[in-house]
Image (cartoon, grey):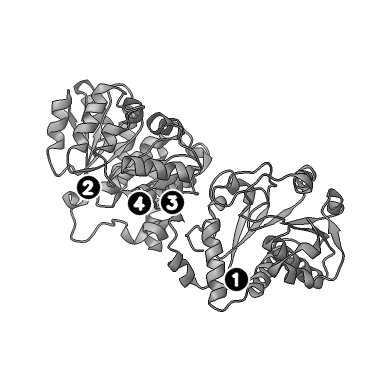
């Protein structure tokens, strides 16, 4: 399955480019409808099916699917929103092949149905469902009918997964050529059910010409650049991460440092308040623990160029002292991660960071921290993450069930493999440690953030129910073995 995500506008360009290259519109529609029918045949036993068609090309796909299922002996009722005479273009062509009755779209068409095919509206819907469409969508939910959606469940906006008024929950969604952001962003992802990507004959070169800027996060995006140890390498060539430790919330830096080591950093130094040095050293023998009683001592650690990646924020405690250390790190030629208490320390004051940040730094806020630093930006999670990355000049990883990684140049990736078990104290500290460990080994900011987020999700899936943050670094070796075997 290809990892590019196409916006509604980009998918329209792909359709037009395919037709310009000699693939007629009716052929594309016939293949799309055939893919829908094939998915129904593969997933469900023959049963009465209600096919709900809208007035556009999505409805045309429904007409084709209805015809093919009827040919296979399925009892099919087809209902249209609007009049057949009003259909135009490829949708009118598809409707001409349906010789059985076309019913008015109303809830009665669902009576006796064992399966509903939702071909009302595709990903390009821009207004809330209302009237008969809203009524029938609500009735599908009340009756808990099995549902196959064409492209996206009607009412889900393709570019961001938002629900416009209402939308049904599909068991299966069939989409074409490439997935849309709605298939990976919440709440759309939860409403799509299983997503089947169908090849309808659009040449792959079309996507290359469109040059999409959004992907689903996974190894095919960054795996070729993953920093596996080399035979001639040694610990110093694998990078040296510097983690700022806190005086009270010591677990955060310890979790992050362990994750950085598991991610492959050759060395990790924890800069610790003097009174905590013993605690840090005894609990993490693989790390170097050095006292940093004040800002000057921390800057002295930064002055060693071998410490090439820095993590600040987890458990550090918000305030002027942390802000001073952040600015000191940004003044050096380093990569790094800003997390947790950094966002409170700079709340409402992005400018001092933006003046110094660059794309080898990664910011990892959750939604609340994001608003503290960047304010309540409008739009989808993709929109907000991209706007924040542009505003600060660094890579922004907006944490959540659909974590978004955005680069200042507009590239973005959505992570879909994170289980809900990761919603536990310390999980974000592990993520920050993974990313700084990868930065220390030379990955760029965008790749490191994407790889760190994916590894974090895979480790969470490997542990499963009962997960606590300490489990995540220990799950990484098995995850990395699988990743390397697939490389």
From mark 2 to mark 3, how far is it between C-alphas?
28 Å
Is 328 placed left or right of 206 in the picture? left
> Of the numbered discs in the image, which one, if any, rests on residue 409?
4
Nearer the N terminus, badge 1 or badge 3? Answer: 1
Callout 1–callout 3 Cβ contact below 8 Å? no
Nearer the N terminus, badge 1 or badge 4? Answer: 1
Nearer the N terminus, badge 1 or badge 2? Answer: 1
> What residue appears at the point 34 percent right and 62 percent down from the top-left corner?
224
Residue that label 3 marks: 413
> Badge 2: how crowded within 10 Å, few (<14), some, or many (20+)?
many
Looking at the image, is 76 positioned above or below residue 288?
below
From mark 1 to mark 3, how far is it between C-alphas?
25 Å
Residue that label 1 marks: 200
Estimate the x, y position of residue 345 in percent, counting from the top left: 32, 26
From mark 1 to mark 2, how far is it between C-alphas?
48 Å
Count of all numbered marks drawn on residues in the image: 4
Residue that label 2 marks: 266
From mark 4 to mark 2, how far is it between C-alphas?
30 Å
Front of the two marks 1 and 4: 4
């Amino acid at each position: 399955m290809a990892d590019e995500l196409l916006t509604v506008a980009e998918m329209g360009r792909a359709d037009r480019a395919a037709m310009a290259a000699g693939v007629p519109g009716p052929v594309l529609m016939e293949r799309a409808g055939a893919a829908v029918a094939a998915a129904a045949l593969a997933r469900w036993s023959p049963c009465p099916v209600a096919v709900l068609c809208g007035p556009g090309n999505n409805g045309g796909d429904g007409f084709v699917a209805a015809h093919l299922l009827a040919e296979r002996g399925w009892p099919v009722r087809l209902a249209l929103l609007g009049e057949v005479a009003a259909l135009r273009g490829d949708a009118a062509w598809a409707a001409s092949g349906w010789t059985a009755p076309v019913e008015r779209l109303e809830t009665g068409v669902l009576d006796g149905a064992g399966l509903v095919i939702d071909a009302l509206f595709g990903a390009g819907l821009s207004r809330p469902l209302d009237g008969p469409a809203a009524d029938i969508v609500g009735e599908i939910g009340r009756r808990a009918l099995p549902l196959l959606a064409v492209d996206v469940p009607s009412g889900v906006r393709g570019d961001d997964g938002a629900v416009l008024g209402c939308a049904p929950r599909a068991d299966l969604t069939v989409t074409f050529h490439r997935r849309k952001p709605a298939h990976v962003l919440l709440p759309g992802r939860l409403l799509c059910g299983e997503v089947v990507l169908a090849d309808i004959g659009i040449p792959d070169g079309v996507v290359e010409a469109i040059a999409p800027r959004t992907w689903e996060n996974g190894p095919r995006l960054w795996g070729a650049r993953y920093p596996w140890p080399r035979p001639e390498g040694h610990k110093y060539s694998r990078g040296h991460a510097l983690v700022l430790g806190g005086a009270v919330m010591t677990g955060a830096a310890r979790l992050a440092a362990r994750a950085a080591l598991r991610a492959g950093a050759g060395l990790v130094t924890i800069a610790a308040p003097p009174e905590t040095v013993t605690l840090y050293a005894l609990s993490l023998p693989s790390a170097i623990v050095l006292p940093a009683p004040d800002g000057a001592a921390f800057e002295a650690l930064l002055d060693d160029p071998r410490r090439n990646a820095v993590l600040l924020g987890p458990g550090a405690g918000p305030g002027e002292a942390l802000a001073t250390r952040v600015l000191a790190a940004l003044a050096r030629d380093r990569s790094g991660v800003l997390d947790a208490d950094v966002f409170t320390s700079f709340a409402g004051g992005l400018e001092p960071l933006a003046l110094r940040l660059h794309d080898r730094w990664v910011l990892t806020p959750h939604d609340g921290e994001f608003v503290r630093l960047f304010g309540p930006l409008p739009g989808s999670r993709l929109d907000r993450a991209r706007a924040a990355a542009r505003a600060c000049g660094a890579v922004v990883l907006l944490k959540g069930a659909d974590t978004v990684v955005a680069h200042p140049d507009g590239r973005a990736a959505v992570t879909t493999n994170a289980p809900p078990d990761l919603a536990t104290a310390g999980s974000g500290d592990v993520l920050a440690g993974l990313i700084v460990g990868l930065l220390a080994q030379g990955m760029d900011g965008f790749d490191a953030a994407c790889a760190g987020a994916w590894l974090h999700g895979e480790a969470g899936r490997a542990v499963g129910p009962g997960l606590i943050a300490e489990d995540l670094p220990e799950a990484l070796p098995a995850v990395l073995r699988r990743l390397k075997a697939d490389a």
